[in-house]
Amino acid sequence: MASKKRNSLKFTITIVILDLLTLIFLFLFYGPISYFRNLLITTAMTTQNHKYLAQILYSTKTIEKILKQNNIVDMNQNTNTSDIQMENNNQTDYDSVYEEQIRKRNPNNDLYKIIPLEGKNYKGYLVAIYDASRISLVSSKDYGIKGQTLKDMASSHHAKVATNASGFLDTDSYGNGGIASGVFIQNGKLISGNANTKARIIGFNQKHVLTLMNATAIDALNAGIQDAIEFGPFLIMNGKPATIKGNGGWGIAPRTAIAQRKDGIVLFIVIDGRQPGYSLGIDMKELTNILLRYKAYNASNLDGGASSSLNIEGNLYSKPCAHSNTKERFLPNAWIVK
C-alpha cells in the first residue's frame, strides 16, 4: 500500500513539473514578452540547418514579422579609403583601457596582439594586427572540391594568425566547404562568384586598406581590390555604425568579424558560442559595440556559427562548435597573417 502511495506521489510530482515546464515554455515563447520569441526566431532562421526550430513553433507570417522588426539597415555606400592613414604610433598616452590594449604592444611581438574578450554569456578574442600588408586571403588545398579546417590551411601557409572568411555553398543540405558562397577574389583575380552582380564585398586593396563595397566583382577588381570575399552585413562604415533594429536579425551565435581602425590597425574578432556554461555567443548589436569600443572605422561581419574559429601560430586558439573530432568545420578560405 505504501509503495502504491509513493508511486502515485512520484507520478503526481512528475505531472506537476511537466505542467510547470510547459507553462514556462508557453510564457517565454508565446507570452507578452517578445525577447525570447525574437531571439529564437532570429537565431534559428540565420543557421544553415536549424531553421526548423522556428518553423515548427511559429507560422511563416509570424517569422516574417519578427525578421522585419529585427534587422540591420543596409549601408549603401563604400569605404572612403583615403581616410585610413597607416601609422606606426607607439604613444604611451591612452584615452581608454581599450586603446591601451590595442596600442601597447607585446615586447616580443610587434606583428600582432591577442586580447581576450568576455561579457555576459560570451567569451572570445580580438587580434590586433599592426601591419596590414602581412594579411592575405588563402583558399583550401582542393578548392572547388572540398574545404579544409582552419588549422590545416594555417599550417600549410605557415600563418602566424588565421581566421575564417567566406561562407560556403550548401548543396542538398550538405556543405563540405568546397566552394565559397558569392564573390571570392584572390591575388587580384576572380576565383569564383558572379562577376557582374552587385554584392557586399569585403577586401583589401593594393594599399592594404580594408575596403567595404556595394559593388560587382568587376568594380572591385577595377578599384584595385587584391583579396576579397562576399559577406556581411557591414557593421561600421567610415566611422559610422549601422542602424540596428532589435537584435539585428541574426540572433545569438558564434561570430567572426574583420575591421580596420583609422590608423590602419586591423582587427580580427572571434566569439565562441553554442556552448552553455562556457559561451553562448553574441548578437550583432553587441558585436558592433565591441568594434566601436576598439575604434573600428570600417567593419563587417563574416561567416559565423560553427565556422567561427581562430588559429594562432598553427594552434587552434578558439573553441569552435562544429560536429567533428576537432570541432572545426571545413572551410573554403581564410584570412591569414604571415
Image (cartoon, helix red, strand yellow):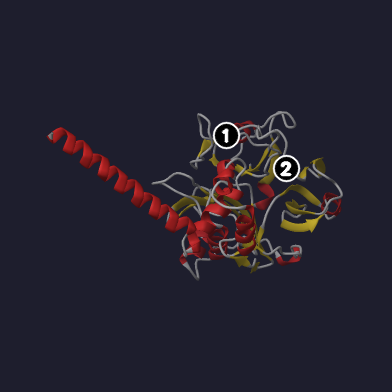
Count of numbered tags: 2
Callout 2: few (<14), some (14-19), or many (20+) C-alpha neighbours within 10 Å? some
Q: Which residue is mark 1?
A: 151
Q: Which of 328 and 158 lies nearest the eye of the viewer?
A: 328
Q: Quadrant of the N terminus?
A: top left
Q: Is residue 269 above or below residue 235?
A: above
- The amino acid beneath tag 1 is Lys
| Residue at 70% in and 39% down | 138
| Residue at 50% in and 71% down | 95
Q: Is residue 116 left or right of residue 203?
A: left
- The amino acid beneath tag 2 is Ser
Residue 212 percent across, percent down from the top left: 73, 58
Q: Of the two numbered discs 1 and 2 on the same chain, state the one appearing first in sequence.
A: 1
Circle 1: element type: helix
Circle 2: element type: loop
Residue 318 percent across, percent down from the top left: 50, 43
Q: Is residue 182 left or right of residue 167?
A: right
| Residue at 56% in and 46% down | 56
Residue 181: image tag:
2
Residue 180 seen in this snapshot: yes
Q: Which of 254 and 100 lies nearest the eye of the viewer?
A: 254
